[in-house]
Image (cartoon, helix red, strand yellow):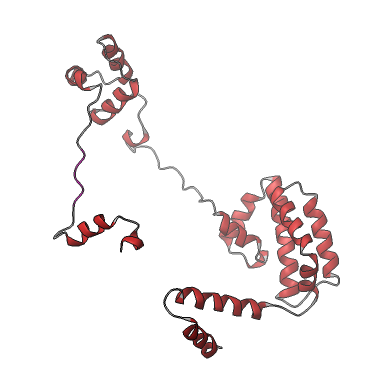
Amino acid sequence: MARATGLARGTVRKYAQAESFPERAARRPEPSRLDPHLAHLEQRMPQGCENAMELWRELRDRGFAGTHRQVHRFVAEHRTRPARRAARKWLARTSSPAPDTIALSSPKQLAWFLTQPVATLPPYATAAMGRIDQDPEAARFGALAQRFATLVRTCCVDGTPPADPAGELDIWLDAARLSDIPALMTFASGRERDGTAVRAALTTSWSNDQAEGQISRLKMLKRTMYGRAGFPLLRRRVLLAA
């Protein structure tokens, strides 16, 4: 248990042998520079003075060496009416409610939108892409990302590749290099380094999906059995599942 939780053995033993849940002891308030002046604050605030800066100046003249933030915190905790510049939570909700705001999509959601056919996107995704297109650089990024996703989808999924997939890839790589968008330029450089494999994926019907799937399955078996059994049982699980 100590290894699993990262706690000391003595701590684990104490909790394991406890008859009831050990409640955390309440922290004793630490002394503050404001303590000698609390009587003055408790006298002035009922008189109607709840201006923290004014109270701080009075305390400073009386020898208080702390900052105005300490006085601000005390006044905020003991305030009996809203401040002149009241926070929103103090204001009565007499005005009409603010219109609902549209939540922004997360980066993962936007990445998914960019890889899907535009015609199949739900209305909220189309609206999100419309907001993204208001920024010129984001619009260029989105257009190039969708072009690459469409090329891969038509060649590898739909089975309706263009006449020259390799040529389309070269055109896209040139456009990505000239986009001045660091993320796209880095992605294009990586595709160029693996140019032979990428072109083969776009132009041939062969795939290493089966091999990658088997490798992932073997890794999963090894990780689930690590430290639990020896090689004979691991070999048996692999062969019986094949």
> Was residue 48 drawn as part of the magenta stretch in this picture?
no
| Image position of 90 (left or right of 174) | left
Residue occupying image coordinates x 46% and y 48%: 100
Whether residue 5 is visible here, answered yes or no, is yes
Residue at x 31% of width, y 60% of height: 2
Determine the image quadrant of residue 214.
bottom right
Q: Position of residue 134 (x, y in %)?
A: 66, 46
The answer to whether any part of residue 82 appears in the image is no
Q: Does residue 72 appear left or right of residue 30 in this picture?
A: right
Residue drawn at 79 percent across, 52 percent down: 177
Residue 160 position within the rendered picture, expressed as x and y whole percent measured from the top left: 77, 76
Q: Main secondary structure of the magenta part?
A: loop
Give the quarter of the image for residue 70: top left
As drawn, which residue projects farthest toward the bottom?
Answer: 240
Q: How many marks?
A: 0
Part of the protein shown in magenta: 23-27
Q: Is residue 71 above or below residue 185?
A: above
Say if 78 sits above or below 137 in the image. above
